[in-house]
Amino acid sequence: MDPRKAIGLGIVCILVGLLIGFLLWGPRSDRLAGELAQVKARLAEATQQLEERQRQEQRQGQLEAELKRAQSDLQELKKDLQLERQRRQKLEQLLSEGRK
């Protein structure tokens, strides 16, 4: 075989091998790159949801603390109101006894 034919045949074989390799692995890598992009998008979405959930839980904790303070204030006001009613009742008794 002539060396030029051998070199030409070798180059053709290499080109055919590269073409076959591209056809076999090229679309696969494109598909994997697409899947990777989808996974990254889902991960970003999940991260945002997690951060939103954490903000909601933090806000819920703040609201619960405010509610406890409000309930404590309400109990204190109820006690004050009861004491004020008792004082008023005593005062009314004293006034009614003074008129008799």
Image (cartoon, helix red, strand yellow):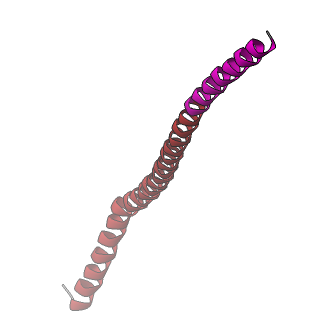
Compare residues 26 and 87 and report the one nearer the observer: 87
Query: Which residue is at 74% across, 12% downward?
Result: 97
Question: Is 98 positioned to the left or the right of 19 in the image?
Answer: right
Tell me if residue 97 is in the magenta stretch. Answer: yes
Residue 44: image location, x then y, percent: 48, 56
Query: Which residue is at 54% across, 40% downward?
Result: 69
Compare residues 66 and 100 and report the one nearer the observer: 100
Q: Main secondary structure of the magenta part?
A: helix
Residue 47: image location, x then y, percent: 46, 53
Residue 41: image location, x then y, percent: 49, 55
Magenta region: which residues?
75-99
Give residue 75's quadrant in the image.
Answer: top right
Give residue 2's quadrant in the image.
Answer: bottom left
Query: Where 94 sits versus 8, above or below?
Result: above
Q: Quadrant of the N terminus?
A: bottom left
Which residue is outermost to the left?
1
Query: Where 53 sits versus 43, above or below?
Result: above
Q: How many marks?
A: 0
Query: Where 6 sits versus 35, above or below?
Result: below
